[in-house]
Amino acid sequence: MISFTRGVPANEAFPLDELLSCSESAIQNFGAKIFQYSSSFGFQPLRELLSEEYGVSPDQIILSHGALQILDFTSSCFLGEGSSALVELPTYDRAIQVLKRSKATVMGVPLEDDGIDLKALKEKTASFKPRLIYLIPDFQNPSGTTMSLKKREKVAELAREFDFLIVEDIPYRKLRFQGNELPQIRDFCPERTITLSSFSKLISPGLRVGFAFGPSEIISRIALQAEETYITPSLLPQALVFEFLKRGNLPGQIKKLHSLYFPRLEVMLDSLRENFSGMGDWIKPEGGFFVGLTLKKKVEAPLLLSRAKEAGVLLTDGRGFFADGGGDNFLRLPFCALKPEEIREGIGILARLIKEM
Ligand SMILES: Cc1ncc(COP(=O)(O)O)c(C=O)c1O
C-alpha cells in the first residue's frame, strides 16, 4: 500500500543513536526530578531554553504532550457553547475536531495561494465576532501554502480591531527548504497570540513533546487546565528533548530532514506536473510536509477513496479538512514518509483512477 493518509515523518529520519544517549544523560543528570510529580507547565530547563530562543520569559511557555493537546486546552479555556472560532478553509482536520469538541461554532475562511482571504476574514470577524482564529501560517497543513508578510500584519490588525485571540500553529516552520523565513504573526501582535509548536516533526512524534508560548496570563490558564487533566506532563521525553537541544543536535537533525524531504517534494511536484496538468491545481510549497491538490472536477470522495484502496493507494477524505462543508475535490498529499518511487507510482495510479471517474 502507498499511503497518502497521514502527515508523519519518515521512520529513517529518527535520530535513534542520539536519542538513546540523550535518554541516558537525562536520567543521569536529572534523576528523581523527572520521575516525580512536578509543575503542570512542564520541565523547567526546557522552558528556559525555549524562552531564550523565542525571546519570551519562561513563565510564558508551557510544555505538553504535543501541540494538539495544547490546542485542546486552549479551546476548553476560551471557547464553548455560543462562541465561535474561525479556521482556514481547508485546515488541519484534527484541529477542526478539537475546536468543535468545545461546542463552539467553527467556521472556515477561504485560503488563497498566499494565505487566508483577508476580505472574507474581515467580513466573518465583523459578522460573527469570533473569540479565536486558528491559523497555520507556514507550509500549511493540508495545502502547503505560506501566509504572506502583508497578510500576517493584517491579521494582527484585525485581531486588535475585533478583539479576538490568534492561535498560530507552526510545527513545520523550521522545515523550510527554499525561500526566506517570514516573521511570525505573533511579532505583530504578541499580546493576543498563542504560538503552538512541537518537536513531533523535527525529532519524533512518539516523544509527544509540544509547546506553546504567549501572554503569561493566557499560558497560566492553559496550565491550570493541564493540571486538572494530568497534574504533570510526562517529564522524561521533555528532559530528553532538552538534552538533544543542549548538545546542539537540532541544527544537524534539521539539515538531515531537509536533505531527505526536499527531493521528495520535488518528485511530488514533478509527478503532479506529469499527471495532473489541466486536471487540478496545487501550489509549490517552500517547505513542510504537504501538497494540497484541488481537482478541477468534483469526484465522489468515498468512491475515490475505495477505488484508490483497491488499487493500492490510501487517501484521507478531503472533506475532513473543510470546517463547514465541501472538499470533495480536495486531496492532501503528504510526501515526507514516502520513497520517491512510491510517490511517482502513487500519483500515477491516482491520476488514472480520477481520469476514469
Ligand atoms: C498543523 C499541525 N498542528 C499540530 C499537529 C500535531 O502536532 P503534535 O504531534 O505536536 O500534537 C500537526 C500534526 O500533523 C499539524 O499538522
Image (tube, rainbow, N blue to C red):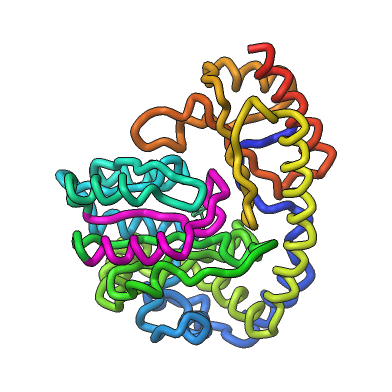
Residue at the spot 68% in from the left edge and 12% down from the top edge:
356
Query: How far across and down, in percent of the image, does residue 191 sit?
Result: 28, 75
Query: How far across and down, in percent of the image, does residue 59 sit?
Result: 36, 82
> Image height check: is 73 above or below 347?
below
Q: Is residue 136 magenta?
A: yes
Q: Is residue 29 magenta?
A: no
Report the side of 346 relative to 105 (left or right).
right
The answer to which quarter of the image holds residue 173 is: bottom right
Residue at the spot 68% in from the left edge and 82% down from the top edge:
25
Span highlighted in magenta in the image:
131-160
Residue at the spot 31% in from the left edge and 48% down from the top edge:
119
The answer to which quarter of the image holds residue 307 is: top right
Report the side of 269 relative to 76 (left or right).
right
Report the side of 241 relative to 197 (left or right).
right
Residue at the spot 84% in from the left edge and 39% down from the top edge:
341
Foreground pick, 65 / 232: 65
Report the side of 244 relative to 40 (left or right).
right
Report if residue 314 is visible in the image. yes
> Image height check: is 230 above or below 142?
below
Foreground pick, 292 / 11: 292
Foreground pick, 259 / 8: 259
The answer to which quarter of the image holds residue 309 is: top right
Q: Residue furthest top?
A: 356
Q: Residue furthest left?
A: 82
Foreground pick, 317 / 17: 317
